[in-house]
Amino acid sequence: MAKENNGRKYTADEIQVLTGLEPVRLRPGMYIGSTGPKGLHHLVYEVVDNSIDEALAGVCDTINVCINTDESVSIEDNGSGIPVEIHPQTGKSTVETVLTILHAGGKFNNGAYKVSGGLHGVGISVVNALSEWLKVEVKRDGNVYRQTFERGVPTSELEVVGEVDSSFTGTTISFKPDAKIFDEVKFSSETLEYRLREMAFLNKGIKIVLDDKRSNKKKTFHYEGGIKAFVEYVNRNKTSIHENIIYFESEKDSCVVELAMQYTDGYSENVFTFANNINTQEGGTHLSGFRSAVTRVINDYSRKYGYLKEKDENFQGDDVREGLTAVISVKLMNPQFEGQTKTKLGNSEIRGIVDSLVSESLERFLEENPKDSKIIIEKALKASHAREAARKAREISRKKSILDNTTLPGKLADCQDSDLATTEVFIVEGDSAGGSAKQGRDRKYQAILPLRGKIMNVEKARLDRILGYEEIKAMITAFGTGIGSEFDIEKLRYGKIIIMTDADVDGAHIRTLLLTFFFRYMKPLIENGHVYIAQPPLYKVTKGKQIFYCYSDKELDDLLNELGRDKNYPIQRYKGLGEMNPEQLWETTMDPETRTMLKVSIEDAVAADEVFTTLMGDKVKPRREFIQTNARRVKNLDI
């Protein structure tokens, strides 16, 4: 008999049992992260990952990715082809089995794939479940086999549709993402390009072709140099300080470690780590092993050849990694991922393996290339001196604050609460907008930090110079986290850091300068989802006593169509936040109930580094080319 509780009956009838691919369609976010653009493109990555696994097994060297005019995608490889025989456990063809059953695939058997990436056997069936239709063609045993599906359900049997020379094998997956699942079915060629180029770098010799039928543009990614070519690509808009790229590939205990590294005259560290082709954005044991080896080897070499005297302190990790671009790729059996997004390698044995192999190879490089070694050590020495200068500057700043008995700096109007779940600080451009924001805010949980003018471009400066800039010191103190080696996100004072600038060219420039600072020196703020960009309205439309705010040209156009274009309604184009009174600023941009904000995230660290280097770096030519390429995307240009 069912127990009654407040009139509710809890019986077996209420237990829902989902079979097949039903759970994927019911909770797609659990399998691909989201139903937005990130999840949409993830479908392509999952199919490509299967083809890459064929390449890792040594049976595939070409992958063709085609975006069709109807936003369907076709991925073709020349691997061994999915087996077509009846699977003994399911009684269905192996093709149908791997496309309709979760966790079915060769990745769970080390005899089929020693190393694999992707979602470990979930991916291809998830793609099938979330597609309006999917078609698979397999070339194998001299035949061409085909089967079709709709939303994960077979609409045909696996059948032979042609013959082919027995030497030709491979798999072609074509699918159209389901518009009932995804917010918008529109692929970005640029987004796919970044990922496919990365995969080609990580798997030297493989050729990946991206063919966008919508624009008739085709690109081929093929790098015999592998991750060595990867480092060259990342540094192409930077100035390297030594000619030879440090590179090695070695194996120990069934783990293959590949490393490429080169120093530039910049001040930021760019180390990209991968495990079985998966971008481990949160690092992990392979990154720890790499860092400890580099610091120890360069210190030992510096003492051996007199760069560091007996009285000198050892270099710190930040000193030996200043201006470093490095790619570390490990391939191992049974990787263990952890972290918030499962992109942190956790295998404890990998740290020692990477440490040992990197130490051995880096020692050999330094001994065999004394000219390059001298340049690298001198770079570390300068970084060490700058770090010491920055430390003294921080100490002086702290003492001065104590002696002057000052509170939080930079005209900061602080909030009353301290709960990170609610508190937020608005970084506002100028005293005028700052005044409106201070009057319009909710003092309980909203703080305002006005900035005077534009902050310095940190892309072109070391930390000791950056700390001499008052507006940057104000932000560091207000946030509470410290900076550089002292950065501690646990000390963060606000849950949201919101950049609120004018909707004009100067406002965009200030926003870019601030994002460059966060990306280069406070990256965990972005990685942990604390940085936002406010979206003030572009237009104010008045109809009698009614006021409408529009945040884009399209919204304005839609509103005018709705109100009737035959009327001549007053339209105000906002260029500065100071043009709004406190009540308007609160209602449109600051009120959590009505505002729109963009959350800043790092989808691709390589791409983000490239953009900041191009826009904020020393070289003019890449910046000019970037502007020429993207000029047509400009929506609002002040004249």
Image (cartoon, rainbow, N blue to C red):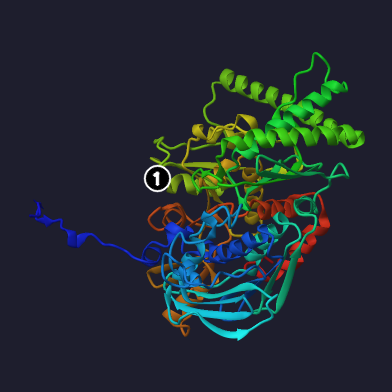
Please tell me which residue lies in front, 458 or 408: 458
Quadrant in the rendering for residue 427: top right
How busy is the neighbourhood of tag 1: few (under 14 within 10 Å), some, or many (20 plus)? some
Q: Where is residue 104 in the image (x, y as percent from the top left)?
A: 47, 61
* Residue 400 in view in this figure: yes
Residue 108 in the image, given as x and y percentages of width and height: 51, 54
Q: Is residue 243 left or right of residue 516?
A: right
Could you tell me the amino acid type at mark 1?
A: Asp
Name above or below for residue 367 compared with residue 590: above
Residue at horizontal 56%, vertical 80%? 145
**Residue positioned most to the right:** 371
Q: Position of residue 477 (x, y in %)?
A: 57, 32
Q: In which quarter of the image is the N terminus?
A: bottom left
Tell me: residue 52, above or below residue 466.
below
Instruction: Name which residue lies at 43% across and 81% down.
Output: 155
Relative side of 233 to 184, left or right = right
User: Which residue is outermost to the front?
Assistant: 88
How many dots with numbers? Answer: 1
Label 1: element kind: loop
Residue 19 lies left or right of residue 209; in this view the side is left
**Residue closest to the eye, 464 or 322:** 322
- The C terminus lies in quadrant: bottom right
Task: Report the residue marked by disc 1.
Answer: 442
Q: Does residue 550 show up?
A: no
Q: Is residue 173 above or below residue 260?
A: below
Residue 321 or 210: which is nearer the viewer?
Answer: 210
Q: Name the spot of residue 358 as percent of width and height, x first.
A: 74, 36
Residue ID at (61%, 68%): 188
Front residue of this view, candidates 196 and 91:
91
State the image quarter where residue 577 is shown. bottom right
